[in-house]
Image (spheres, rainbow, N blue to C red):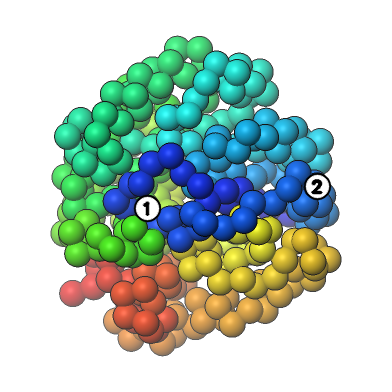
Amino acid sequence: MERYAIWLITGKCNLSCKHCYASIYRNRNELSLKDIEKVANNLKNIRVKRVGLTGGEPTLRKDITKICDILFKNNIIPDIQTNLINLNEELIDYVKEKNIHLYTSIESTKKEIQDRIRGEGIWKRIIENHEKIAKIGISFSPVVVITSLNENELLELVKLAYNIGARKISFLPLIPQGKAKENWNELKPSTKSLRMFLEKVNTLADDIKFNVHLFCMPFAEYFRYSEYISVSPCYDEDVIDISPEGDIIFCDVLDEKISSLIEDKPEDALKKLRESDTVRISEERKEKVKECKNCKVIDFCKAGCPARAYLTSKDYFKIDPLCPLNK
């Protein structure tokens, strides 16, 4: 059984996006290369084969290529999540040479919306850098946070990703943590718009034969029928989230330390995750969230995103407030 890890290697960022939940990590300590080697070795020992390096902005670490080399040495393939702002020729050459996949950021097809979310002048730089990496053959996939500002152009974003040569596009709805918590009332997408998108994206994906990944919204499984659509559950025992300090956390939104890949033996760290109260609660949601008991995707969805439910109600057994099936 192969595993995938999502590793926040830094909390630092060169932007201050209105929808960012990872801003809670901004002042956190980073691991040294020595500790990164230890974590990488431990990940290899629990059969992690691929790691998504995220943050913050991972490319702000001057040793980002050394981190990737450490992962490669442990037979782990790194991906990098980046806003593309810090992209330089040296890093571009390295990513190209090593065939590293980039997860990039696009929030809108409109300059004024993108700049409103990420900052003045960002739209132009993001589009130019997408065109640059596409031209030289670097593999990339945009990631879109769904908010009230872009909820009516999600299908257009699928077309944009397809037209600029992306491998796929991923969407996740806003989660009220960090900066996104401060702006929740302004940026919260409507369930009506979400439903409309989920009902129509299957047809579009089929028509253009383009992969669309939906995560942090397991209720999307209710609408899925296209082979080009994939939906992630909120908890998957084959996916591990890792904090900047090398801790295993239930998810990078909640930032709840479960175990340590520095202090614990790797199998023990994984066992602590499987046996944690948070995992137990996430499994119990399908029995205890009464609105969801008769839903046809309850076994997969488990009442939606537990983080979004908890952060909006302080109760893990409330329904995901963005579920478009909740009447």
Residue at the spot x=43%, y=16% of the render?
132
**In this picture, is 65 found above or below 195?**
above
Q: Which amino acid does label 1 sit on?
A: Cys
Quadrant (top left, top right, bottom left, bottom right) of the N terminus: bottom right
Query: Residue 218 at what x, y percent from top left?
Result: 40, 61
Q: Mark 1 points at which residue?
A: 20
**In this picture, is 157 found above or below 152?**
above
Quadrant (top left, top right, bottom left, bottom right) of the C terminus: bottom left
Tell me which label, 2 or 1, sits earlier in the chain.
1
Is residue 112 visible in the rendered image? The answer is yes
Is residue 292 visible in the rendered image? The answer is no
Residue farthest along the top direction in this orientation: 135
Question: Spatial distance from mark 2 to mark 1, Cα to Cα?
Answer: 29 Å
**In this picture, is 56 found above or below 173?**
above
Query: Residue 185 at what x, y percent from top left?
Result: 19, 64
Name which quarter of the figure residue 187 lies in: bottom left
Is 63 or 275 nearer to us in this picture? 63
Residue at the spot x=57%, y=76% of the render?
279
Q: Mark 2 points at which residue?
A: 34
